Image: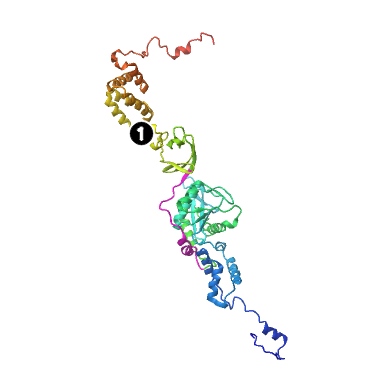
Amino acid sequence: GEAGLKWPIGEALDDERLEALLFPPPRPSGTLRPVPDWAWVQLELSKHKGTTLALLWLEYKQAQGDDGYQYSQFCELYRRWRGALDVVLRQPYHGGEKLLVDYAGPTVPIVNPHTGEVREARVFVGALGASSYTFIDLTWTKALPDWIDSHIRMFEFIEGVPRLVIPDNERAGVHKASRYEPDLNPTYHDLAVHYGTTVLPTRPRSPRDKAKAEAAVQNVERWVLAPLRNHTFFSMGEARGAVAPLWDQLNIRPFQKLDATRRSLFEELDRPALGPLPPTRFEFGTWRKARVNIDYHIQVQNHFYSVPHALARREVEVRLTATTLEIYFAGRRVAVHPCRPTRGRYSTNPDHMPADHRAHLKWTPERLITWGGTLGPHAATFIAELIESRPHPEQAYRSCLGLMSLARDYPPQRMDAACRRALTLRSLSYRSVKSILHSGLDRYPQQQELQLRLPPAHDHVRGPAYYRSTPNPKGD
């Protein structure tokens, strides 16, 4: 057979030689068998979703034939090779799939050159899963506005959007940590919707979920922050300028056990798989709740904005940006207004008014005065002074509409005469004109009007000092 033996066996073969012929020692592994290119295997697993070790082993066996390793040996050798890699390369992330974000522990001191005050700049770090391509941003705080701005700059730096953004549960974007349903800040959720990605916070007490982020932070601390530890910075711009070249060197630094850099892997794995940036930048907005008043307006920063009148007395949600105010009810946007800085003023959409209120908006002070002139000069003067007497012109519109109603029942001459008498009495109201017309006082000549007001120096006007000094007749 395969041992080259024939029967009968000669006496020259003793038991040891016979055993060596029948049971030869196995060929040494790793010397005669071709070793797979494990770096290529790792890249293929990261580059194409659905690629498995079983598929890559089949392709390897087709190329090597009987000399190749069997599947179990292939997998075991791959696991050994991967275990020797840095932690940033161990997990097979797919290109464009995940972007992990966190803050570094160390800060960057920045000295105010005028006062000597030292402020600590926070270091925001983001790393793509497949390539470990790293983004760094310095901000004054970890608060929500800085958190959102760092994300915007990060997406613009990688010129695309990953399918998942994975922050730490304890950061500004997460209201409530939960293993299964973390509660995101509404503004952070808006950011994700705007850029077409999904935020998936790490699970509490699950260190493997954020191993990539922690490794990226460690590399930033080691290769970027540590070299700058003895530098003194006097502005945020100066600090960012010093970080930039070290950050660039980190992304082009070769891996120790992989013939690649973060930037080369980014170009090969992540960039082709990233989603596109939206046409407009995200605009930061805060959320708050407000109660609709009976006049179908809400108060935000001492300005009043209208909502549909059917929502009077209901609670609504408000999203406020630098330029726009949006109002939501039951998850649906019901109103939008430009932000107005004027305090105590109203922004009213005519469509939000009840039908009987909309007639006011068809008129302006100039148009109302012009209409009064069609009745006569006194009517025009009365309307002008009526509008001037109110804190806001809109408060006089209802009275003017009442005058228009009276004008349908009385001729212009009587309307003008009634306005003249009301002016003389300094009674600037719709009710005064109506009372004059109903009583017929507008028909009396002007010189027959009674002097209803007493002169200031009349003997019967004693003044407040008199009553303060007069004893109480009851002796109380």
Outermost top residue: 473
Please say if 128 is above or below 384.
Answer: below
Q: Give percent across and percent down for residue 39.
A: 53, 69
Q: How is the image coloured?
A: rainbow
Secondary structure at badge 1 equals helix
Q: Which is nearer the eye, 387 or 180?
A: 180
Q: Which picture quadrant has residue 456?
A: top left
Question: Given the image, on which type of amino acid does mark 1 rest?
Answer: Leu
Q: Residue at x 28, y 24 (%)?
A: 375
- Image quadrant holding the C terminus, namely top right
Q: Give the magenta range.
A: 259-286
Q: Which picture quadrant has residue 454?
A: top left
Is residue 433 left or right of 3 when viewed as pictured?
Answer: left
**Residue 279 located within the stretch drawn in magenta:** yes
**Residue 361 located within the stretch drawn in magenta:** no
Q: Which is nearer the eye, 326 or 128?
A: 326
- Image quadrant holding the N terminus, namely bottom right
Q: Give percent across and percent down for residue 385.
A: 33, 25
Residue 111 seen from this side: no
Residue 315 seen from this side: yes
Q: Give percent across and percent down for residue 99.
A: 51, 57
Q: Give percent across and percent down for residue 120.
A: 52, 49
Please say if 386 is above or below 176.
Answer: above
Count of all numbered marks drawn on residues in the image: 1
The residue indicated by pointer 1 is 361
Please say if 452 is above or below 242.
Answer: above
Q: Which picture quadrant has residue 403?
A: top left
